[in-house]
Image (cartoon, grey):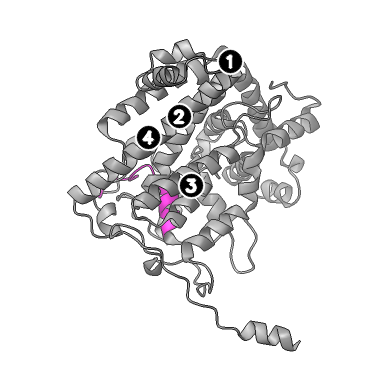
Amino acid sequence: MADQATASAVQLPAVPAPPLAPWATDYRRSRGRLFAEAPSATRTEYQRDRDRIVHSTAFRRLAHKTQVFVPMAVDHFRTRLTHTIEVAQIARAVARSLGLDDDLAEALALAHDLGHTPFGHTGEDVLEVCMKPWGGFDHNAQALRIVTRLESRYARYDGLNLTWEMLEGLVKHNGPLVDRRGAPLARHAKKGVPADILEHDARQSLELWSYASAEAQAAALADDIAYNTHDIDDALRAGLIDFEALRGVEFVGDLLREVETQHPGLDRQRTIHEITRRLITRFVEDVIAESLRRLREHDCRSAAEVRGQSRPMVSFSPALESADKAIKGFLFPNVYRHPRIVVIRKNAADVVEHLFDRFMRDPTLLPGGRAQAAAECSEAERARIVCDYIAGMTDRYALAEHRRLFGHAPDLQ
């Protein structure tokens, strides 16, 4: 007992502040959490955010959610979790080189896909249609629901009680959602900003008209870099595309020829890796150089000045922005709409649609307290309960639920 008392009385040193550039987000000036908490003696605010995400149930479920390829027969394809880890690694590298808070960038990268459904974008597309009468479905809004409502771990509050900067970055990492008058922008222009985001913004303003922090912008570009390169990697290994198809893709074809010149006769597996590692390196180096140029050109002296710009400060150069678009333009018809993938997507879509319809018609089939809650509420509230349940499923759990309710599940190999 004496040892325990002595240990508890030890004064821990203050958490050292990382060296930051003027435009970085300083955790010591965080706008705080919705529910006030005493600071940690051993971790910065954004390190605490990162740790809460890693220990969350939603984060663990990413291990069994599809990225592009349903990993039923082959263990080496990316899942949402392995994709997320790759994004976090790239985000940290970019943030560190720009003098940003790399803990915040990493935390945002680790959280960016928490709202994704089973079966990749297929599940999201189906839930968007199913939920259309009740406000639709948006994976960024779902991520916000998870970290502010659905995670039930702490005694004092629902969600993870993340910092303002984390919530802002989750919602706005792709840019402002509205203009200064409140009119929806970009992809929200047609359907409007998701209700969950607006409801939270009314409670705790996320300044939806401004850009997010440089750390959030770095995480968003890390996502682009990661999925462009690993989707090429996985597609080559799956046999959906070959090297000849890549020769005509801007920038990628040049890298392939570079590898062949430097390593003639290199085997296929190593050639694939050489292409993908060079893609990542070139994109990361380009982002760092272009972002430093923009930050200095605009003389950004604070995180607030980064948010107040009329364009993102963390960006590809025009040349690699063109290459990024060319890669996406190649992947969409040749990989995401490949006949083999289309068949799997159709079967996966049927699973999500069947589950949603069955639970809406008979909410007593929902597990635990969800059944009673869904039976005693309005149709709109029931739809959201069902949507939350399905969106949180892993691929294999969705298939198991389909077997439970319908006696069978499709083969997704």
Residue 162 in view: no
With 291 as the anchor, is 85 left or right in this view? right
With 106 as the anchor, is 176 left or right in this view? left
- The mark nearer the N terminus, 1 or 2, is 2
In-front residue for pair 101/376: 101
Please state the extent of the stretch shown in magenta in the rendering: 165-180
Tell me the residue that label 3 is attached to: 109
Q: Are marks 4 and 2 in contact (CB under 8 Å)?
A: yes
Q: CA distance from mark 4 to mark 1?
A: 25 Å
- Residue 228 numbered mark, or none: 2
* Residue 31, image x, y percentages: 39, 66
Tell me the residue that label 1 is attached to: 239
Residue 351 in view: yes
* Residue at x 58% of width, y 58% of height: 52
Q: Residues within 10 Å of mark 2 (few under 14, many from 20)?
A: some
Q: CA distance from mark 3 to mark 2?
A: 16 Å
